[in-house]
Image (cartoon, helix red, strand yellow):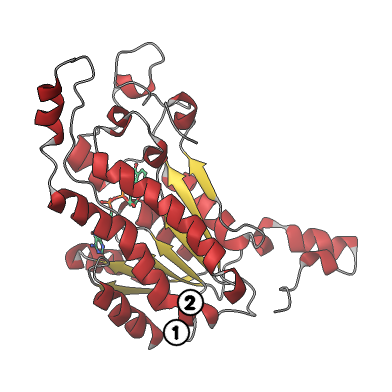
């Protein structure tokens, strides 16, 4: 496979500067993206950033009402560049069906964002106790279904989707942007102390696993010309954060105050939750940069600097 054309080949300094201008470097016209969980939260932040820069976006989401509402909201400004596909990403058959559905609307997919994710059951670790039964009482709240549900959406859906979309991704080879898979990981995937992840044991494990999947897929798909990267958000105010964890805006003091009491390690050094543009900028950087593969970029306001973490 020959490398894609580069602005470095510009004939004059003027042409080089023009080629490196943000309006050219980040012009996403012709790019076709699939974003799972794209109807809300971080997936919607990715979707809107891509749309704003000229890409076509296929949103895949379980929530048909929310999906329709996003199509209605952005339909006219996206000028025919936004499509919706209702489905459950955790089902292998659904991944195949949705890839077929998308394939009827586009001859190629430039980038697949495996973003849909869920949390389940928080367990408060009784760190100060020296009694085994206190630990058993807490750990025992976890059963097979709690792990399976979280892993089915957060880990094996990205694998099923990567597999189902391989032919459409390969069809993007030779284009301006080489094909890519981008997985939404999480800084919580690095947590050793799960109280910094609000005691979300299965979620924390699943996010560690999706980072590893990113690296395994990057390694596995290199000869297909498909790059695989990820980004690891810190704390963004989204539906799952609001409903599951009860976040408010502005953030509660214990998240941002240097001295305030709070959950250990979750203070955000930049002192605010992540924002739409923080995800938008990293999504655009990853889709346009052609020289990264097997990387997971943290977008966390410095949280990881404060966490007992394995990164
Ligand atoms: P969200 O709940 O706001 O959005 C998730 C979207 O995924 C929803 O639209 C939902 O309908 C969809 N979805 C859920 N299960 C699905 C399924 N089985 N099939 C298809 N769609 C499904 O959550 P969010 O905060 O935007 O999270 C998005 C991703 O970002 C997740 O992978 C999450 O782990 C990750 N993340 C979020 C944060 C944060 O601070 N919000 C931090 C780190 C990582």
Query: Which residue is most to the top?
Result: 259
Q: Which mark is residue 280?
A: none
Q: How far is the residue under mark 2 from the one under mark 1? A: 7 Å
Q: Is mark 1 within 8 Å of ligand 1?
A: no
Whether tag 2 and tag 1 are in contact, CB under 8 A, the answer is: yes
* Closest to the observer, 301 or 277: 301
Q: Residue at x 56, y 76 (%)?
A: 30
Is residue 290 left or right of 113 when viewed as pictured? right
Q: Residue at x 30, y 31 (%)?
A: 194
Q: Residue at x 24, y 72 (%)?
A: 86
Q: Residue at x 65, y 63 (%)?
A: 290
Answer yes or no: is residue 85 visible: yes
Location of the N terminus by quadrant is bottom right
Q: Which residue is mark 1?
A: 106
Is residue 245 left or right of 258 when viewed as pictured? left
* Closest to the observer, 24 or 162: 162
User: Vertically, is 24 above or below 45?
Assistant: below
Query: What secondary structure is found at the residue carrying circle 2?
Result: loop
Q: Which mark is residue 109?
A: 2
Image coords of residue 198 (percent x, y):
25, 32
Image coords of residue 205 (percent x, y):
32, 44
* Closest to the observer, 24 or 297: 297
**Residue 123 sits in which quadrant?**
top left
* Closest to the observer, 26 or 304: 304
């Amino acid at each position: 496979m020959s490398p894609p054309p580069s602005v470095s080949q510009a004939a004059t300094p003027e042409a080089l500067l023009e080629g490196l201008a943000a309006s050219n470097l980040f012009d996403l016209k012709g790019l076709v993206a699939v974003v799972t969980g794209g109807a809300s939260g971080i997936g919607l932040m990715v979707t809107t950033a891509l749309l704003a820069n000229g890409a076509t976006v296929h949103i895949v989401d379980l929530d048909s009402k929310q999906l329709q509402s996003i199509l209605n909201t952005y339909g006219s400004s996206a000028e025919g560049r936004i499509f919706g596909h209702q489905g459950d990403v955790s089902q292998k058959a659904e991944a195949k069906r949705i890839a077929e559905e998308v394939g009827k609307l586009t001859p190629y997919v430039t980038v697949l964002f495996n973003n849909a994710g869920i949390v389940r059951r928080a367990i408060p670790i009784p760190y100060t106790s020296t009694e085994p039964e206190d630990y058993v009482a807490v750990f025992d709240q976890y059963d097979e279904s709690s792990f399976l549900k979280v892993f089915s959406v957060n880990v094996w859906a990205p694998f099923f989707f990567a597999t189902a979309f391989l032919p459409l991704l390969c069809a993007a080879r030779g284009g301006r942007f080489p094909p890519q898979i981008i997985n939404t990981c999480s800084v919580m995937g690095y947590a050793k102390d799960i109280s910094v992840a609000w005691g979300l044991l299965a979620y924390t494990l699943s996010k560690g696993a999706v980072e590893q999947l990113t690296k395994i897929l990057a390694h596995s798909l290199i000869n297909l010309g498909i790059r695989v990267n990820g980004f690891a958000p810190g704390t963004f105010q989204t539906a799952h954060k609001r409903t599951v964890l009860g976040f408010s805006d502005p953030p509660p003091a214990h998240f941002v105050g240097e001295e305030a009491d709070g959950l250990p390690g979750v203070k955000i050094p930049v002192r605010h939750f992540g924002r739409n543009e923080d995800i938008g900028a990293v999504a655009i950087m990853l889709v346009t940069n052609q020289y990264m593969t097997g990387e997971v970029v943290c977008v966390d306001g410095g949280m990881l600097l404060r966490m007992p973490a394995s990164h």
